[in-house]
Amino acid sequence: MIYVGTFSKVLYPGLRLGYLVLPEALVEPFRRANARLHREGQYLVQAALADFIHEGHFARHVAQMRECYRKRQAALREALAPAVARGLMLSAGQAGMHLVARLDTLAEERTLVEQAAAADILLSPLSQYYLRPPVEAGLVLGYAGATPAEIARAGGWLAQRWLALRGEA
């Protein structure tokens, strides 16, 4: 099995460093291929990142970010609680930086996205993530880059609007 990843999302997008986790038998062939394909490397940046990881800073950073995202997800769930209590379906959200709210129709999705834009709230329609029909209606609710106050405002707004669309507000 080969694992491929990047440090762009977990550390800094401008870092532009990726990684491969390879079986031992593939390390040397990949090293030779990399040397032929990429003659110039970011050796100084790679060495600094290796020290950062070796000294435990990366593991601490990941742990801090997991806790931060856990709290932000809890804040979003709290803000959406009135709608969830009335039937709004949310994804389990055991990991990651977003939840998915399932909606009944694409018309409901479109209405919420349009009304949110008018309220200066960005909602991402689930339907845009499908390459071809059939698509599912819903909202991808990202919380990674939002403050607790922004989460409370947007989540509270969404709960109210969803209930209002159903005639329950």
Image (cartoon, rainbow, N blue to C red):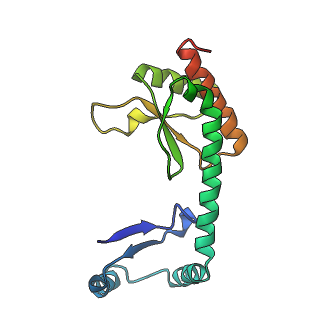
- State which quarter of the image contains the C terminus: top right
Toward the right, the furthest residue is: 149
Residue 136: horizontal and vertical position, in percent?
36, 31
Q: Is residue 94 left or right of residue 27?
A: right
Q: Nearer the viewer, residue 18 or 143?
A: 143
Residue 141: horizontal and vertical position, in percent?
53, 39
Residue drawn where x is 39% and y is 33% of the image: 127
Is 158 above or below relative to 77? Answer: above
Residue 83: horizontal and vertical position, in percent?
58, 26
Residue drawn where x is 37% and y is 68% of the image: 4
Is 11 above or below relative to 121? Answer: below
Q: Is residue 101 left or right of residue 2?
A: right
Q: How many marks?
A: 0
Residue 53: horizontal and vertical position, in percent?
56, 79
Residue drawn where x is 50% and y is 84% of the image: 43
Toward the front, the furthest residue is: 85
Q: Nearer the viewer, residue 76 or 42?
A: 76
Is 51 above or below relative to 150? Answer: below
Toward the top, the furthest residue is: 167
Residue drawn where x is 65% and y is 34% of the image: 79
- State which quarter of the image contains the N terminus: bottom left
Q: Quadrant of residue 143?
A: top right
